[in-house]
Image (spheres, rainbow, N blue to C red):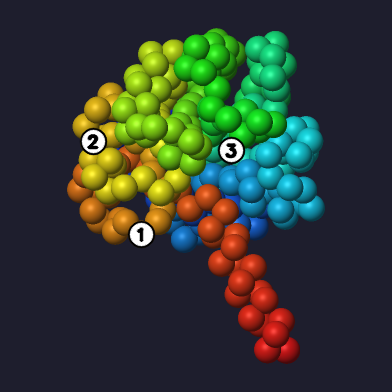
């Protein structure tokens, strides 16, 4: 079983895959030593750690260099948050995916918002982009982010289900409705999506999410924020 297959299997084991997102090799090594079966980066945390704002402000070659260092430092699968792919054209996206695959990453988070306008891309545009990624990386785990809970949307649940179905048909591996998703919507999403569902860690109980059939839970930049808060408290104490 190669690293792509191992990472894919973690989403289909029936056990909740918990990913406290990291931003460097030290964090990845720590999680591996604690027994976590995979590690994930968070774009906001990676950007902040290197002096950039979030929203694809950090150069993509720096992202790939960092991901390659993380992959080289651990024996577990690594998935990278690449925002909207750091490219507006399909050719540019394909080139970036080839660079990302060369790092040894097993998966990506791929969002359906335009970083410049902060607005949702159309389903047609996003499915074309997912198809382009799948053509370049047949085994890559594509965690297709659905941003309807963090962008203006009249009916987030209905729109999330429509986008999820289209994204899976285009080649996505799983669906990530990011943001504060109500627990009632979580159950409906899991029931209505024919693939693994990723939920952001919030106020929900992890056991309840697992009972509902959620495959994966992410912390996003929360892990780094708590780490920085701990450092701040130590510094103030000094």
Location of mark 2 (residue)? 188
Who is closer to the viewer here, 162 or 170? Answer: 162
Q: Residue at x 66, y 31 (%)?
A: 117
Number of other residues with Cα within 10 Å of mark 2, as a class: few under 14, some 14 to 19, many 20 or more: some
Q: Which mark is residue 81?
A: 3
- Local SS, label 2: helix
Secondary structure of the residue carrying numbered label 1: loop
SS at mark 3?
strand
Q: Is residue 4 left or right of residue 69?
A: left
- Mark nearer the N terminus (1 vs 3): 3
Is residue 34 visible in the rendered structure shown here? yes
**Given this view, does label 2 or label 3 mark the residue nearer the observer?**
2
* Residue 162 % position (x, y): 35, 21
Crowdedness near tag 1: few (<14), some (14–19) or many (≥20) residues, C-alpha within 10 Å: few
- Measured as percent of width and height from the top left, residue 60 is found at 75, 33
- How far is mark 1 from mark 2, CA to CA? 18 Å
Q: Residue at x 53, y 50 (%)?
A: 220
- Screen quadrant of the N terminus: top left
Residue 136 is drawn in which quadrant? top right
- Mark 1, residue position: 203
Mark 1 and mark 3: span between their CA atoms? 23 Å
**In the displayed structure image, the side of residue 36 where residue 27 appears, left or right:** right
Lower sequence index among marks 2 and 3? 3
- Marks 1 and 3 close (CB-CB < 8 Å): no
């Amino acid at each position: 079983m190669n690293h792509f297959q191992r990472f894919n299997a973690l989403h289909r084991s029936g056990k909740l895959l918990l990913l406290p997102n990291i931003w460097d090799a030290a964090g990845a090594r720590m999680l591996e030593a604690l027994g976590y079966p995979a590690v994930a980066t968070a774009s906001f945390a990676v950007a902040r750690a290197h002096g950039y704002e979030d929203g694809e402000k950090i150069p993509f070659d720096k992202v790939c260099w960092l991901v390659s260092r993380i992959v080289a430092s651990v024996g577990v699968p690594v998935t990278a948050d690449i925002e909207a792919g750091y490219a507006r054209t399909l050719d540019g996206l394909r080139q970036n995916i080839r660079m990302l695959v060369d790092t040894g990453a097993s998966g990506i988070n791929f969002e359906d918002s335009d970083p410049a306008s902060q607005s949702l891309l159309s389903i047609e545009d996003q499915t074309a982009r997912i198809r382009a990624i799948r053509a370049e990386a047949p085994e890559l785990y594509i965690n297709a982010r659905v941003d309807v809970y963090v962008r203006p949307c009249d009916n987030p649940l209905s729109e999330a289900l429509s986008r999820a179905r289209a994204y899976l048909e285009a080649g996505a591996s799983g669906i990530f409705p990011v943001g504060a998703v109500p627990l009632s919507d979580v159950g409906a999403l899991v029931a209505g999506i024919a693939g693994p569902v990723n939920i952001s860690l919030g106020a929900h109980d992890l056991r309840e999410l697992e009972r509902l059939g959620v495959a994966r839970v992410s912390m996003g930049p929360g892990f780094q924020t708590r780490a920085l808060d701990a450092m701040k408290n130590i510094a103030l104490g000094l």
